[in-house]
Image: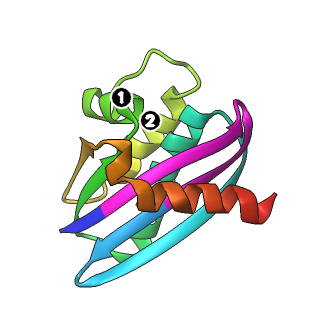
Amino acid sequence: MIEIYVDGASQGNPGHSGAGVYIKAHGHQYEYAFPLGMHTSHEAEFLAVLKALELCQNQFPNEILSFRSDSQIVVDAIEAGYTKNKRFQPLLTEIIEKGNQFPLYFFKWIPSKQNHHADHLAKQAIHENY
């Protein structure tokens, strides 16, 4: 099973944003910081999940994925498979489509203090690229 910690950050709302992805897999750790352009903080959270799924498609196909996120909005939307927010709907649809390519994927909400590594990477993506 692959453990994936994701976080999105935005400098302004909307503003320059970044995604942080921290992966623990087979005794190794992987870190990624992605600049995302201009988005709200919630959009950045959804985009961080998409970036993580893309990484896993390339590096860990056919693995079970265990996601951790401190975004209650993202976790609730993915678990329900639905969001009322029209801006999040296409992102959620893409997450579900990409997630369904794996044997199993699930999400767990964690407090921000347990997601500091992904948070640092998301903020790093903003500051290094803007």
Element under disc 1: helix
For residue 117, above or below residue 96: below
Residue at position x 26%, y 45% in the image: 107
Q: Position of residue 37 (x, y in %)?
A: 74, 48
Residue at position x 25%, y 60% in the image: 65
The reply, left or right, for residue 78 in relation to residue 93 is left
Residue at position x 24%, y 70% in the image: 62
Q: Nearer the viewer, mark 1 or mark 2?
A: 1
Residue at position x 31%, y 57% in the image: 101
As measured in the structure, the alpha-carbon distance from the residue carrying label 1 to the one carrying label 2 is 7 Å
Q: Position of residue 38 (x, y in %)?
A: 75, 41
Asked if residue 52 shows in the view, the reply is no
Q: Position of residue 29 (x, y in %)?
A: 36, 79
Residue 77 sits in quarter: top left
Q: Residues within 10 Å of mark 1 (few under 14, many from 20)?
A: some
Decide which of 8, 115 is in the foreground and name it: 115
The stretch in magenta equals: 4-20
What amino acid type should be assigned to the residue bearing mark 1?
Answer: Ala
Q: Position of residue 122 (x, y in %)?
A: 57, 56
Going from N to C along the chain, the mark reached first, 1 or 2, is 1
What amino acid type should be assigned to the residue bearing mark 2?
Answer: Leu
Residue under numbered circle 2? 92
Element under disc 2: helix
What residue occupies the far top of the structure in this picture? Answer: 84
Decide which of 63, 113 is in the foreground and name it: 113
Residue under numbered circle 1? 77
